[in-house]
Image (cartoon, rainbow, N blue to C red):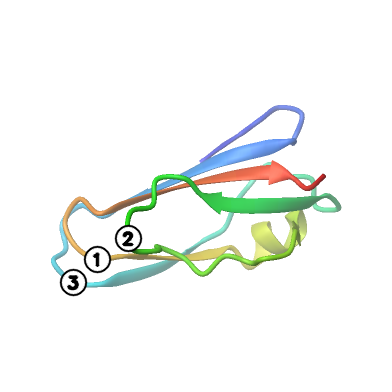
Amino acid sequence: MFASEDKSGAALFALGLDKDILVEETLCLRGLDPDAKYVVTEINRDAKLHAELPKAPVSGRTLMEKGIAVRLSGKFDSASFEVTLAR
């Protein structure tokens, strides 16, 4: 995960390496403003979604404490997410 210095956004990456099974992990973000609202978008998705993302903006605190549950379905499956300040 990479967060901008001004806490206006972040990029989150997940990669499945060595498992031929469905894996679900909760990834807690870091470096966000806990009081700001963010929109999370999956940016490399194909036909399948790797996470059920909130439709409404969510607080930085929630993203840092509860995280995002990401599902990867085998070797080299990957997911990329963009986190931006809600406008």
**Residue appearing at x 66%, y 57% in the figure:** 64
Q: Closer to us: mark 2 or mark 1?
A: 2
**Residue indicated by mark 1:** 73
Tell me the element at label 3. Answer: loop
Sort mark 1 into few (<14), some (14-19) or many (20+) by Cα contacts within 10 Å. Answer: some
Apparent side of residue 74 relative to residue 25 in the rendered image (left or right): left
Label 1 vs 3, first from the N-terminus? 3
Badge 2 element: loop
- Label 1 secondary element: loop
In the picture as drawn, the residue positioned furthest to the front comes out as 47
Look at discs 3 and 2 and give the one toward the viewer. Answer: 2
Labels 2 and 1: the sequence-earlier one? 2
Judged from this view, the residue extending furthest toward the right is: 35
Q: Is residue 53 above or below residue 85?
A: below
Q: Residue at x 74, y 54 (%)?
A: 60
Q: Dot 2 corresponds to which residue?
A: 47
Identify the residue under disc 3. Answer: 21
Q: Earlier in the sequence, mark 3 or mark 2?
A: 3
* Residue nearest the observer in this picture, 28 or 76: 76
- Distance from label 3 to label 2 (Cα)? 18 Å
Q: Residue 65: x and y, percent?
A: 67, 64
Badge 3 crowding class, 10 Å Cα cut-off, few under 14, some 14 to 19, many 20 or more, is: few
Residue type for callout 3: Ile
Q: Are marks 1 and 3 in contact (CB under 8 Å)?
A: no
Quadrant for the C terminus, please: top right
* 17 sits to left or right of 70: left
